[in-house]
Amino acid sequence: MLTVPNEFFRNRAQSEESSVSGAVWLIEYVCEQLGLRDLSETRVLDVGCGVRFTQAFINRSIPIGQYVGIDVYKELINFLQSNVADPRFTFKHIDTHNAMYNPDGEPLVETTDLDIPERSFDLIWLFSVFTHLAPHDYVTMLKVLRRHVAPEGRLFFTLFIDENTGTGHGYTDKMSHALAARSEASVAGQAAPKPAPFRDGDPSRPLVYALYSREHALELIEGTGWQPLSIALPNPQAQHQIICSPV
């Protein structure tokens, strides 16, 4: 049983139990999207790992072949390294810059060393990472990750796409609903303007909401060594999800 001190939960609005249950749901959802029965034979690289997936795998006895978690939060990684003895799990600290989570870190560049084997992972996933990346880091992250995917592997990441989906779960859905309550233009039925390729949803809090148009999100993938396979709409546990395969 892995018990995690409260200080290692970043931006968690739910209880620890709800957080772990959400992770379980996401694991099952990813398996469904990729046509996998479970992850018992899958080597997973989790970038921006936090603690919830490790807790889910260990505390709920969910099958996993190999799990490597990477995070910019050094104290969190130190805790996991000291408290998870299962040989299937490895944790690495990476000191890369992010305006929201690690403003004093080193810039992410194509040659950034993640200190993990290349071409080794069947599945690379990133939850709530691209949602906080500016375009130059979006492209660079894709290029860095490309070195570490197995030939038949997959990349799964979440992203804020600036569009109304009708699900009620997307950032733009929620903002549009709030604006509609007081917008005369909305009441008059005027068409919404075309979204900008990229915008910071709340400049007062840099990159809390990194919003991309659908078109630009796909354009940025070109030339990174990946090809997009699908884009799924937001759900109660995740924003838009993009699945890619290596070119």
Image: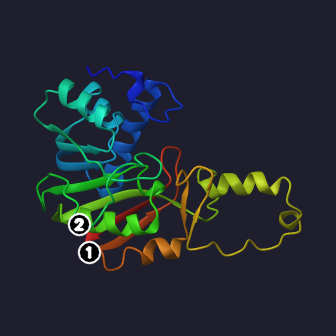
Q: Is residue 61 visible?
A: no
Q: How far from the left and from the top, in percent, is residue 189? A: 84, 69
Does residue 80 sit above or below 1 in this rendering? Answer: below
Q: Which residue is mark 2?
A: 146
Question: Residue 216 location in percent, x, y?
Answer: 49, 75
Q: Is residue 213 visible?
A: yes
**Above or below — where is 208 with respect to 148?**
above
Q: 61 and 53: which one is in front? A: 53
Looking at the image, residue 112 lies above or below residue 59: below
Three-letter amino acid code at disc 1?
Gly
Q: x, y (%) of residue 34?
A: 30, 57
Q: CA distance from mark 2 to mark 1?
A: 6 Å
Quadrant of res 53: top left
Q: Secondary structure at mark 2?
A: helix
Where residue 65 sits, quadrant-wise, is top left
Protein image colouring: rainbow
Q: Which mark is residue 225?
A: 1
**Would you place residue 85 above or below residue 50 in this image?**
above
* For the residues bearing labels 2 and 1, Cβ distance under 8 angstroms: yes
Tell me what residue is drawn at x 24 percent, y 55 percent: 123
- The mark found on residue 134 in the picture is none
Circle 2 residues within 10 Å: few <14, some 14–19, many ≥20: many
Judge from the rendering whether residue 227 lies leftward or rightward of residue 198; answer left or right: left
Image side of residue 240 versus residue 8, left or right: right
- Marked residue nearer the N-terminal end (2 or 1): 2
| Residue type, numbered disc 2 | Arg
Say which quarter of the image contains residue 107. bottom left
Depth check, front residue: 51 or 177: 51
* Secondary structure category for the residue under label 1: loop
